[in-house]
Image (cartoon, helix red, strand yellow):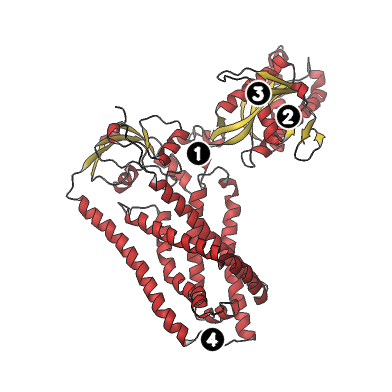
Amino acid sequence: MAQRKTPASADGQGIRQGLRLASGLVLLAFAFSHFLNHMLGIWSLEAMEAGRLVFIALWRSPPGEILLLSALLVHVALALWKTARRRSLRLPPWQWAQLLLGLAIPFLLIPHAIGTAGLAHRFGYEDSYRNVLSVLWPGLVFNQTLLMLLVWLHGMIGLHFWLRPKPGYGPFKPVLFAVALLVPVLASWGWIDAARRLRLTENPPFPLTPEMAVWSDPLIAALRNGFYALVAMALVAIAVRALLRRPRKTIEITYPGDRLVRVAPGPTLLEISKMNGIPHADVCGGRARCSTCRTRILDGLDTLPAPSATEAKVLARISAGEDIRLACQVRPQAPLKVQPLVPASGAARVAGSDGDAYHWGVEQPAAILFVDLRNFTGLAEHRLSYDVVFLLNRYLGETAKAVEACGGYVDKFIGDGVMAIFGMKDGLQAGCRNALAATNAIAETMERLNVELGPQLNAPLRVGMGLHAGAVILGRIGAVSGNGASARITALGDVVNIASRLETATKELGHSLVVSSAVLEAAGYTCNIAGKTEIAVRGRREPLDVFALDPPACLVDTLTGHSSPPA
């Protein structure tokens, strides 16, 4: 059945998610800069006060206050809105942790905010470190330390699950984890040590007046009560919605194995799966930031509205057919027969501590290099099998070393050929520059092997290399099967096919390297125009501009102005 063509609804969820992320990043930036200020207490109270002047100039300025207050109100409002709209409280542990931390923070944050910025605005109170530390130490040390931990942990959970699907996150995660651990430790060390020194050396008088307490205490209680009243309203909304669903008609959702569940319309398909204990992959937590909850609609597709802009964007990136939908975005209103496409067991592994985004596939720019040994059939003719394997292993091993020494990743060996990926971690420009350096290194490697193996060869070893760059899909093909295929990352897409075509073109053009102009432009190099030509590529209307070279080719580095082979 064809999907019913209804106009896509306004993508309110995408806007809310963007606002929640942006407001969360603003609040995290505020907390981080505040913690950095606290760390200065390790050196001296004077260093803290000097840092406070910078902090105040940034966050107490009119633009800073407007940005901070707006971010706080938006973040809290959207969090309560999302909580109130939940159809189920069956959440993964990390979502429960983030939710409970978010609910606990205002209890401690409201007194701190009113006792510093609030008193400063109302009474002209100078909330300097000297005054604030006199209030906090020693009676409120536990409250302040706990507040810092709650805020930081809440922010780090959100940051981790935002970054987790991104391809460059995994390699840097141990370093980022160490930084995330050190920040609250050093911040607590800084302010506590400064407070102790202040009490021992000066023991300043308590800076707050009874008038301040008369004003601030009722305000703190009112704000606390107001916030938790809103939380209670959100929980009541969930309960009322659950009660209202009971007398309404139910719909049937049929899962693989003819497993049938009956639910009232309203929840998303992903929520329905979780409510009924049916495993369903969702690496991003149902935020439409990945495609792991994608589901084939076997029956009832015509009852679903068209995808929203957010869902359509994700589906387009995976070239999904019309019968594929994201379970986190679909709210069934009529019976459906569905088939989740990503095994939940595989998603659980990715959702764990290792968090490998390549398990599901990511799209990013990269440079692809193909290397092929010329006339290997002639070299292998009349040789013993041992000699053939030895010769091939020497060539492949040295080529792989050259690739890896230049920052590349060996995708696979294809007979007597090598496919390598550059720029997976360091970006397209660095990847293209490293790939060009690798072609020089491979050419030098061939010269050394020809000297080493000269007496054993009928003819010198020669290679052809093709190099192209652009957007590719990187993934661990076969990783879901658990048969060991997950060990390597491979690249897919048009860029790979073109790079292979350029390697073949080295025979036609009589040079050992054919590199596309896209690589040179991305790398920041220019080349002698005499080597420029065009070749036809299957599937492309226009010919491709390429340069036929013999490494080490002399290129002009437009970033530095130097003319030399890429190193």
Tell me where residue 140 appears, x and y as whole percent: 49, 78
Give the mark toward the camera: 1 or 4.
4
How many angstroms separate mark 2 from mark 1 (CA)? Answer: 29 Å
Q: Residue furthest front?
A: 62
How many angstroms separate mark 3 from mark 4 (CA)? Answer: 77 Å
Q: Earlier in the sequence, mark 2 or mark 1?
A: 1
**Quarter where residue 314 is shown:** top left
Q: Which residue is mark 2?
A: 439
Q: Which residue is mark 3?
A: 417
How many angstroms separate mark 1 from mark 4 (CA)? Answer: 58 Å
How many angstroms separate mark 4 from mark 2 (CA)? Answer: 71 Å
Residue 206 - label: 4
Q: Earlier in the sequence, mark 3 or mark 4?
A: 4
Q: Is residue 534 visible?
A: yes
Amino acid on which the number 3 mark rests in the picture: Gly
Q: Nearer the viewer, residue 30 or 66?
A: 66
Q: Earlier in the sequence, mark 4 or mark 2?
A: 4
Instruction: Check the image and report above or below for 219 versus 561.
Output: below
Residue 359 - label: 1
Q: Nearer the viewer, residue 325 or 67?
A: 67
Q: Earlier in the sequence, mark 1 or mark 4?
A: 4
How many angstroms separate mark 3 from mark 1 (CA)? Answer: 25 Å
